[in-house]
Amino acid sequence: MRDAARAANGRGGVKAAATTCAVLSGLAALGGRASLAALAAHLGAHPSTLHRYLKSLAAAGLVVRDPLTTAYALGAEAIALGLAAMRQSDPIRAADAALVRLRDELGATAFLAVPGNRGPTIVRLEEPAEPVVVNVRPGFVLSVLWSATGRCLLAASRDARLHAIAREELAAAPPRRRSLLPETEPIATLCQEIRSAGGIATVRDLYLVGVSAAAAPIFDFTGAVKAVLTVLGPTDAFDVSPSGPVVAALRAEAEAVSARLGHRVSEPTPLAVEPGGSTAARSAPTAPPDRRPKAANPQPK
């Protein structure tokens, strides 16, 4: 609470308002219900001071006190605020500025895809002044198994239908393409590799010859994947290596969009369902560097 007050003073804000927000955030972090002692310990506040704030919040309907356990919980007004925020949790709107920044900073084609009945479907696309010539537009459905976007969604999603589509695509693929994946448990192994890379999927000359792409998942407040942010460019000038600046910029933007949708990185990472029913946790994202590349955009061969 003292940290919140100091931050408010430094930004010219109202100390009492900042402290009130800290109390509500602390209660939410403890699962929405906590005793006075537990909340005070979590916030580093004196119980008597905290009690005064909780009393005011209770009068406003933002918290309620259980008469039996004396624990405090988020009240009806807090629930109404949360529902209003949830109604604004639109990944397309939240990612709009990120797409423009990625386009301009990377000189890349950037697009947003959402889960569809047959795989990830492009809903927003931004192209640079000299775009890579690719036949993708809003409404286009991408391959689940052979595109960076589809692989990213596959590794992050709980949807068993998506894994079924991936198995269908694998069975229908020519031998040369199938040989690009591990022989044993190819889909499960691929998903684990993507999770180990922090959820970022990359491909080079796979979905389209001469084009490389990187894709990052966008999560909402429940930890569910809601969309995939993808950038692509010519392979000879677009480095999608895991430690490169393209992936770093993409990761930073995807994390920022997820945060706007209420996703908390510190929360337990949801498990993604494997085709065989096993589960595996996604790796936590790493902090990106500030460097941005300058990529040319020749037409692929």
Image (cartoon, rainbow, N blue to C red):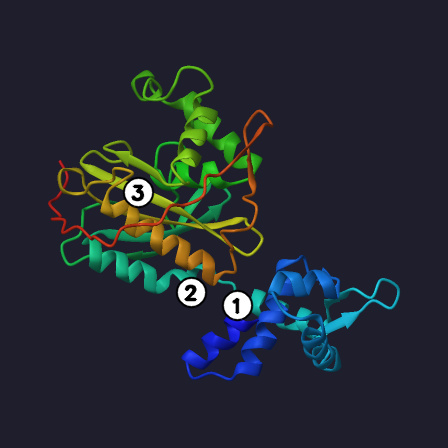
Q: Tell me which numbered mark, 1 or 3, is placed earlier along the sequence.
A: 1
Q: Quadrant of the image for the C terminus?
A: top left
Can you identify the residue that label 1 sits on?
88
Is 273 rendered above or below residue 105?
A: above
Can you identify the residue that label 3 sits on?
214
Is 119 rendered above or below residue 84?
A: above
Q: Determine the residue positioned at 37% across, 23% down.
A: 173
Query: Residue 65 location in percent, x, y?
Result: 80, 70
Q: Amino acid at mark 1?
A: Gln
Decide which of 72, 15 is in the foreground and name it. 15
Q: Amino acid at mark 3?
A: Ala
Q: Is residue 185 visible?
A: yes
Inter-mark Cα distance, 1 to 3: 27 Å
Secondary structure at badge 3 equals: strand
Can you identify the residue that label 2 sits on?
93
| Crowd class of label 2 (few under 14; some 14 to 19; many from 20; radius 10 Å) | few
| Crowd class of label 3 (few under 14; some 14 to 19; many from 20; radius 10 Å) | many
Query: Residue 292 location in percent, x, y?
Result: 20, 53
Q: Amino acid at mark 2?
A: Arg
Q: Determine the residue positioned at 61% across, 59% down.
A: 29
Q: Residue furthest right?
A: 68
Q: Are marks 1 and 2 in contact (CB under 8 Å)?
A: yes
Inter-mark Cα distance, 1 to 2: 9 Å
